[in-house]
Image (cartoon, rainbow, N blue to C red):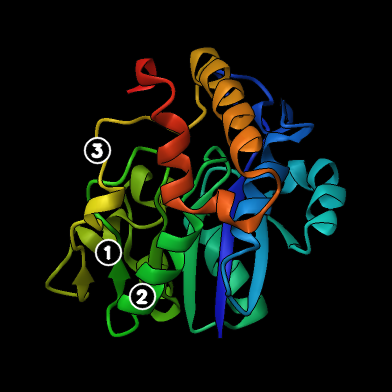
Amino acid sequence: MTALVLQARLDSSRLPRKALLPLGGRPLIQAVMAALKTVAADIHVLACAADSEAAFAPLAASEGFYIYGGPKEDVLARYCDVIRHYKPSRVIRATGDNPFVFADAAWSLHCESLDASYGAYQNLPYGAGTEAVSASALLRAEKEALLPDEREHVCPYLYRHPELFSLHRPPAPDALARPGLRLTVDTPEDYERALVLEAALTGRFGNSPERFSGRAVIEAVACFKEME
């Protein structure tokens, strides 16, 4: 079984409560879930900090996501709690500040990485990618990872130890490779660009599932060269 697990929290020093900022008529975190629910995983889980669960629960339900509250800072442990609860063998990891995640690339990466402990495309726009990870690798990392960033960012212990884990880190497909493009929402400036891009996507693709593809996002960005 494959679980798509989206991590989120409410507090952010650079852009407070950004997950609830409006984007396209809904909170930003809901926009992220709308994109990711098009990924054909067996289950979709919003893994949030426990103190955010009450705020996120109705939004997760509206998008067909389960919700699981866990440690705020030890996000690796939060993922492993989700694994123990839902028992997937594979995890697609996504983060809540990426409303323009390439949903089609998330699934193709998963399919390419089934024999690897860890998978990630290189050279995607910043904020467009996901990671594909085996549940057993994450459980091992939880036992062995000691550095703070290995706990907060979930996967560094895996790709820092290629002697322990099999890694699949191919270049992104040429049509999606835009390493200089920033799509994440982490600052007020990012949010202002996101509002423009969201409007462009809606105007061009409406609410069709096609709008969550990497091609659609890149086409919309092409109208606003200043974003690159």
* The C terminus: image quadrant: top left
Mark 2 and mark 1: Cα distance apart in space: 7 Å
> Residue 4 occupies which quadrant of the picture?
bottom right
Q: Is residue 30 above or below residue 142?
A: above
Q: Position of residue 44 (x, y in %)?
A: 66, 67
Q: Tell me the quadrant of the picture where the N terminus can be found.
A: bottom right
Residue 197 lies, in percent from the top left, at 54, 28
Q: Which tag, 3 or 1, sits closer to the chain's start?
A: 1
Residue corresponding to mark 3: 179
Q: Is residue 113 visible?
A: no
| Residue type highlighted by circle 1 | Leu
Q: In this figure, which residue is indicated by the disc labeled 1?
A: 158
Q: Position of residue 28 (x, y in %)?
A: 68, 35
Is the residue under label 1 in contact with that under label 2 (CB below 8 Å)?
Answer: yes
**In the rendering, which numbered label is found on residue 137?**
2
Name the side, left or right, on which 216 lies relative to 227: right
- Disc 3 marks a residue whose amino acid type is Pro
- The crowding category of the residue bearing disc 2, from other C-alpha atoms within 10 Å (few below 14, some 14 to 19, many at least 20), is many
Q: Is residue 20 above or below residue 176?
A: above
Q: Dot 1: few (<14), some (14–19), or many (≥20) neighbours within 10 Å? A: many
- Where does the image place residue 106, in percent across and percent down from the top left? 44, 62
For badge 2, the amino acid type reads Ala
At x 17% / y 64%, what residue is drawn? 161
Callout 1 secondary element: helix
The CA span between labels 3 and 2 is 27 Å
Q: Nearer the viewer, residue 141 or 36?
A: 36
- Write down the quadrant of residue 198 in the picture: top right
Which label's residue is closer to the chain start, 2 or 1? Answer: 2
